[in-house]
Amino acid sequence: MAFRRLLSVILAATLLPLIASSQAVRVGEPAPAFTATDSRGQMQSLSQYHGKYVVLEWHNQGCPFTRKHYVSGNMQNLQKEWTAKGVVWFTVISSAPGQQGYITPTDENAYLEKMHAAPSAVLMDAEGKLGHLYNAKTTPQMFVINPEGNVIYAGAIDDRPTPDVDDIRGADNFVSDALTAAMAGKPIAKPFTRSYGCSVKYRD
């Protein structure tokens, strides 16, 4: 019995951080504050964009699910469409050195130019601090934050969880849905969905 009690205590101690982490970001609650360095060497913080919509897009250029949205031009089109409407779009790279998706700022800037990508900035998160803060699990994974600083959408980019480029046609884009509804003062039909893609390649 004593052994079972000890095992229960150990399991509880192990699971509690995981449970807390999974609840770190809740739709309808304030988005966790952050400061990060972008690929141009500039410091970016969530607080400096208070009053604007902010999108966070977790990225790994080696992931086939991510490539689907960049090779097709889908992600770039979304970035251009929404930044033109005043939305701040942060691409976030949380891959650790030696892991798939890790890239230097110089190489990332070259990739942005090659792919004609147009985020407001790319946040370099090799230590995984921002990724863990938002409990980002997959690439791509999306978060939308409203001008008041609350998370209004979290989850997948769309309803086609495959790496097939052809599946983009006719897909329901949850990020566009959330931004369109919120800007029109309407409720978001799906404020939370299950993200899909490759696992974020953290250091730990």
Image: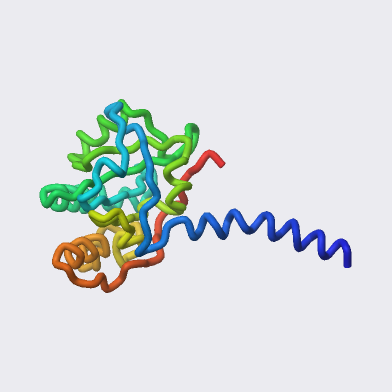
- Give the percent coordinates (x, y) of residue 138: 42, 53
Judging depth in this view, the residue of 32 and 138 nearest the camera is 32
Residue at 36 percent across and 36 percent down: it is 36
Q: Quadrant of the C terminus?
A: top right
Q: Is residue 138 left or right of residue 147?
A: right
At 30% from the left and 36% from the top, the residue drawn is 44
Question: Quadrant location of residue 182?
Answer: bottom left
Q: Quadrant of residue 179?
A: bottom left
Left or right: 184 in relation to 141: left
Identify whether 187 is placed above or below 22.
below
Viewer-nearest residue: 139 or 65? 139
Q: Which one is in front, 64 or 43? A: 43
Please state the horizontal and vertical placement of residue 27, each as a whole percent of the image: 37, 63
Q: Residue at x 53, y 39 (%)?
A: 203
Q: Nearer the viewer, residue 165 or 54?
A: 54
Residue 147 x, y percent position in the rendering: 23, 54
Q: Is residue 5 visible?
A: yes
